[in-house]
Amino acid sequence: MEIIRIPRIMREITRDLRTKSKSIGFVPTMGALHEGHLSLIRRAKDENDISIVSIFVNPKQFLAGEDFEKYPRDVESDKEKLIRLGIDYLFLPDTDSLYPNGYSTYVNVEGLSEKLCGKFRPGHFRGVATVVCKLFNLVRPTRAYFGQKDYQQSLIIKRMIEDLNFDTELIICPTMREEDGLAMSSRNSYLNEREREAATVIFKALKAGEAMLKEYKTPQEATQKMLEILKSQPLVTEIQYVGVYDPLNLEEVKEKQEKYLLAIAVKIGQTRLIDNVLIY
Amino acid sequence: MEIIRIPRIMREITRDLRTKSKSIGFVPTMGALHEGHLSLIRRAKDENDISIVSIFVNPKQFLAGEDFEKYPRDVESDKEKLIRLGIDYLFLPDTDSLYPNGYSTYVNVEGLSEKLCGKFRPGHFRGVATVVCKLFNLVRPTRAYFGQKDYQQSLIIKRMIEDLNFDTELIICPTMREEDGLAMSSRNSYLNEREREAATVIFKALKAGEAMLKEYKTPQEATQKMLEILKSQPLVTEIQYVGVYDPLNLEEVKEKQEKYLLAIAVKIGQTRLIDNVLIY
């Protein structure tokens, strides 16, 4: 595995690869790789000639007061995992090389970015879209792999790819879960033992909501059920949103329809966690 | 010359060209081609294996109440000019293909976009950066050619290329002028005979300002001189800005320095015209 730190070098390598008609599978990450990441990375490797993973904790997608400083970083262990998977390139830029002095260009997907998580993290998805646009220009992926766990993010990147005419196929991969159902997330490492146990309430609520909808209950009834379950757990210190949404535009669903996104964002103690389930 | 109307087809052609290591020279235009455009297009052809010109009157860079509807369009005459120059591809998309229903992604270069013309045309440069980002993804230019007449636009595109890591070299070409000094512009066609004569005052003012600075007068004195000249012309119905600016950040220059941008935006009758001179 070759480790590339300089954006210009990364771009020269991928320019050369595309000249040779190699397909490039790309997984952008913030590191602290868990089985969720690894499932995307395996697919990127299987489905393309060349596999590239980036690790970059992107300051532009953290708000003031969020966990940018303490976000888990373990590059040595990440490298070992990537080498074991046989990844071709690890792109590992530093912050100054992606955001030099005077940096001032931002990509924003309006509408979708203001909903759900966007209400509680204003500017977050602008930071995501901006860094992904940069990474796409440097890595020139044939296919880029994102996890369904960050469903809103995937939807925003899909919209950006279409709107800005990127020559990249977006592939959304299923959420990986711990045995008790908790969605894998680098932020799970913030949880103490009691919080870790309490966090299972999120997926329990989603499954209960899903069951309601499958029994032809209304979206309101399903939401009410999920809310009750979340409220029954005392370590849920804040419920940011819980509900049934349209998977295409993230609007709250009032009437019965064919497809639903059930989504939740809560704080368990101090730790903000999100999860979702799609009904298609 | 091949005429391409479908964005996806344009992207497939340039993907193939880059695979064959062909260099692509690109001139994005809004049509109504004059000698200013043609000077860029000749360079794009001379300096690259393949030359591509786009014609697209971009609605996103016009404000409500501006001249989008009446902007001069003469595609048949434009085509003839491009064929005579031996251009390889004309990219001629329609509005719906570049901005389909639900379009919502915008690229903004903060800071630079709010100065000079940006003060009077809020949102204009966001529209420019967005369409150029899209065109770059479709055309994959090795080199893109812009005119110095739209100096602020060139500076913003340069910043966007660097910030978003586009693999494109920006080439800024000198302003082409009529015999009496008026900068060539598609909007000159709006002027009646008296206004056309009056419009020469813009370049006269710039040359007077330039002469002052070369005689070691202060930027304030040069600005004062330009202002007087503009005010002496009764058909100048509005002076939006006139002054001496830093060519790198477009800030007004108070002290003597090495490099200056002298820039003017005025209305002659109902027609808004801009021009500038660089002292390097």
Image (cartoon, coloured by chain):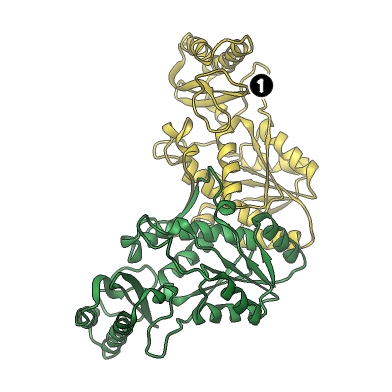
Chain colours: A green, B yellow
A233 w.r.t. B80: above or below: below
For the residue pair B244 and A70, the one nearer the viewer reads as A70
Q: Quadrant of residue A78?
A: bottom right
Q: Position of residue B95 (x, y in %)?
A: 52, 52
What residue do we see at 67% from left, 66% from top?
A3
- SS under mark 1: loop
A106 w.r.t. B235: above or below: below
- Amino acid type at mark 1: Glu
For the residue pair A63 and B161, the one nearer the viewer reads as A63
Quadrant in which the N terminus of chain A appears: bottom right
For the residue pair B170 and A87, the one nearer the viewer reads as A87
What residue do we see at 42% from left, 86% from top?
A178
Chain under label 1? B
What residue do we see at 75% from left, 59% from top?
B17
Q: Position of residue B108 (x, y in %)?
A: 48, 47
Q: Position of residue B276 (x, y in %)?
A: 58, 24
Q: Is residue B141 left or right of residue A113?
A: right
Q: Quadrant of residue B196?
A: top right
What residue do we see at 24% from left, 77% from top?
A235
Q: Which residue is mark 1?
A: B178
Q: Is residue A245 left or right of residue A186?
A: left
Q: Would residue B218 be seen by someone viewing this image from the given angle?
A: yes
Quadrant in which the C terminus of chain A appears: bottom left
